[in-house]
Structure formats: C-alpha cells, structure tokens
Amino acid sequence: MSGKKKATKAGKAAATRCGFVAVIGAPNAGKSTLVNRLVGAKVSIVSPKVQTTRSRVLGIAMRDQAQILFVDTPGIFAPRRRLDRAMVAAAWQGAGDADLVVLLIDASHKQPDEETERILADLKRADRKIILALNKVDLVKQRERLLTLASAMDATGCFSDIFMISAETGDGVEDLMRVLVERLPEGPWLYPEDQITDVPLRLLAAEVTREHLFRQLHQEVPYALTVETESWEDFQDGSVKIQQAILVEREGQKAIVIGKGGARAKAVREAAQAELQEMLDRKVHLFLAVKVKENWSEERDRYKELGLDWDA
C-alpha cells in the first residue's frame, strides 16, 4: 500500500504526501501531549515536570493521502550536563531535518519565558519561517492577552502562521493539522499505514515506567534516574514478562524510589503494568529492580540507544 495512489470519487488519482514535522519548544510547553493528540495514540510519555522527553520520538499519523511523521523533541533549555546538551542538540537537529517546524509556546504564561526567548533569537538567526502554536489557551481567561501575545509573536517575523490551540482538549488542533497536511511534500509513504511510531517496544515499555516514576518523585530524583528493559519474554498464552532496571546515581536515591516498605516502587509497578497492558492489549507481568549506577548518564552506548549524540 505504501507509495501507491488511490482513485478519488472523481476518478482521478490523488498523489500521496509524506513529510517530517518537528515539534519544538521550551520544556513543559506541551509538545508530547500535542504529538499524542495528533497521532491519536500515546507514543510519547507525558508528565507535569519539565524535561520529561529525553530523545526524539517519531509519531506517525494518517490523514487521507498524507502520512505525517511528527518528531517530538526534547525541550530546549540552557543545558548543564552532558545529557542536557545531547537533548537540546537532538531538538535542534530534529528541527533542522524536518520539512515543517511547529514551535509550541505555553500561552498561559503572562510573557514568554527565558527558554522561549532564547529559541526565538535562534530562529531569527536561522532565517526560516515556521508555524507557531500558542498552546494551553484553555487556561487563559482573557482573550485580549492571547491576541496581544499573538501580535507580539507575529512582529518577530519568524512565523508563517499562528494557531491558538489546546493540546489537552483538542481545541484548534484539527485546524493546525489541516495546514500541515496541505504543506507536506508529495511523495511515497515511508511507513506502513497502521504503524504509529518507530520506537522499539522494549524502549517504549521503559519509557512508560519512567513516566510513572516522574509522576511519583519530586525535586532532582526523577532527573537522576533512567529505566532500561533487561528482558522481554513472550508466553504461549499471549502474556509477556518484562523485567526492568531503574538506575539511580546514589544509594539515597534508591531508598527514595523504593519508598517506605517498598510502597512507592509497588505503586509505580502497578501503574506502569496497567498502562502497558492497555497499550499492548495483552497480559503483562512487570518486574522492577532498583539499582545504583553512579555514572549511567555518562555511558556512550546509552546515548546511542536513545538516538542522542554523546559528543554534543
């Protein structure tokens, strides 16, 4: 089916379209929520905390004869660690490689934050027209404030279009999608039309667990951990056994992740297992082990697995 042309009602063949759309923005602007909304399924983890997304995630959506390849990128911010630098580099590379770029700005802020101002400055230097989506408009009670923000953004000269949307509720998202489809280049589809992401299941399962850790933990602890799927065993009854390791940097963090009497680790396991069962549509037996690995964020192979540049 990929790359073929179908007959329209008028009897003419409609050309297929396919292209990459990078979604960029400051941390917590709502990029993953928007990509999940546009794809119509969860392909990228979401939490209220900033910097949840660590690598580029591809979400694949179909609209009529178009296949839209959404690239959910890490938030762009001032990096401090090697992992931070790699995440920001991945975001900019995703934008540079894409056919279309959408900048997402949290419109609920009274004015653009430092990260957004930095992104705007970089976009001006790049001299490339992109699409702006003012997100979380459902949280803004004063319409005049939205119009003022839109006018200020238009004055930068960076944007070909400006949309007001809510990725959470879906308001305005279909209007954005329609314009994206119209501007995609003609070409064959790159993936089967029933595929929604290119993220391997083992990595996706690890990310689901990491999301629930982010939701349970606070301060610096969630940023000092990662999750890896150590084994994946399919059974004849259709169920699957997944063993994962939660890696932290210090013993004190291990105790926090486990919680009193193992309560926090149990809550994370149960929540992640329930979500994986729904996602995979099969019985899941999830086992978690918390391990101390001081320098996990400095391992070159781990960056390769996440699609990040260790030398960024």
Image (cartoon, rainbow, N blue to C red):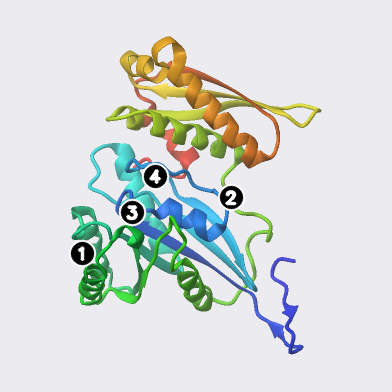
- Disc 1 marks a residue whose amino acid type is Ala
Q: Earlier in the sequence, mark 4 or mark 2?
A: 2
**Between discs 4 and 3, the one toward the N terminus:** 3
Label drawn at residue 198: 2
Q: Could you classify mark 2 by the number of other residues whose Cα lies within 10 Å: few (under 14), some (14-19), or many (20 or more)?
A: few
Report the residue at 53% width, 68% height from top: 19
Residue 102 rendering spot, x and y as whole percentages: 39, 65
The amino acid at mark 2 is: Asp
Q: Which mark is residue 173?
A: none
For the residues bearing labels 1 and 2, Cβ distance under 8 angstroms: no
Q: CA distance from mark 4 to mark 1?
A: 24 Å
Direction top: furthest residue: 261
Name the residue tied to disc 1: 121
Mark 2 and mark 3 lie on one chain; the one further toward the N terminus is 3
Residue identifier under label 4: 309
Q: Residues within 10 Å of mark 4 (few under 14, many from 20)?
A: some
